[in-house]
Image: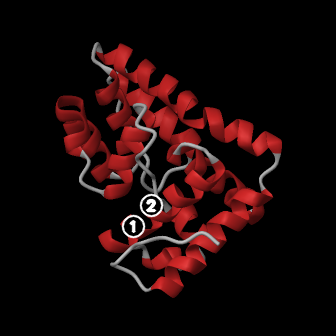
Amino acid sequence: MITLNVTHTPVEATQDILSSYLNLAMKASMQDVADAAVWYNDAQAVALDVARNLGTHLEIGASIVAAFSPRQTWGRNVINAIEFSHGNFVPGLANNRAMAETAKHIGFDALNGQKTNAFARNIAGDTNAVTIDVWMIRAAGLDASKGVNKTEYNMLADCVRTVAKEFGLAPSVMQALIWIVARGEAK
């Protein structure tokens, strides 16, 4: 049995989340694993395009991509980040545009949300950061409409890291794998 030493959440809840994440990882096909292994590399290619368009570096590009991620599909996220990098107006949430504008100057520090900050770091190549979005909350068996607080976010990220260690994968790859399987089951 996988166990996690986390003092900020009830052991039973942590074990349920570990079980949920472990079960999803075990359902993964070989194609799911292959897709998860390259997901953040592919996202990094987008961030590099954004950075090149702006004449800057990867941290800025990854931060801009992450800034456009809240409440967007990945396809829309990519389009918005590329359009922004070309200096075009990007429709959608004003907060996302404001974050992207700030990220253009200060990178990761523009992203105050745990999810967007971790997402930018994953895209930039940090394999230990763990992005917890609504799909990862659902995959944990929690109500995504309520979101999670910082303590719960950290606990979910720790659970992903624990399952990743069991499988010998980087936490970012395990997160991508769980996300892929959870999304696939929802279709």
Q: Residue at x 67, y 64 (%)?
A: 22
Amino acid type, label 1: Tyr
**The quarter of the displayed image where residue 17 is located:** bottom right
Q: Residue at x 81, y 42 (%)?
A: 30
Q: Find residue 57 and report its horizontal and vertical position in percent.
A: 30, 19
Q: Find residue 148 and report its horizontal and vertical position in percent.
A: 40, 73
Q: In this rendering, would 101 be left or right of 149?
A: left
Kindly report the distance in space between the C-alpha atoms of the residues bearing marks 1 and 2.
6 Å
Residue occupied by mark 1: 153
Amino acid type, label 2: Ala
**The quarter of the displayed image where residue 149 is located:** bottom left
Residue occupied by mark 2: 157
Answer whether residue 49 is visible to the viewer in this image.
yes
* Label 2 packing within 10 angstroms: few (<14), some (14-19), many (20+): many
Q: Is residue 160 above or below residue 124?
A: below
Labels 1 and 2 touching (C-beta < 8 A): yes
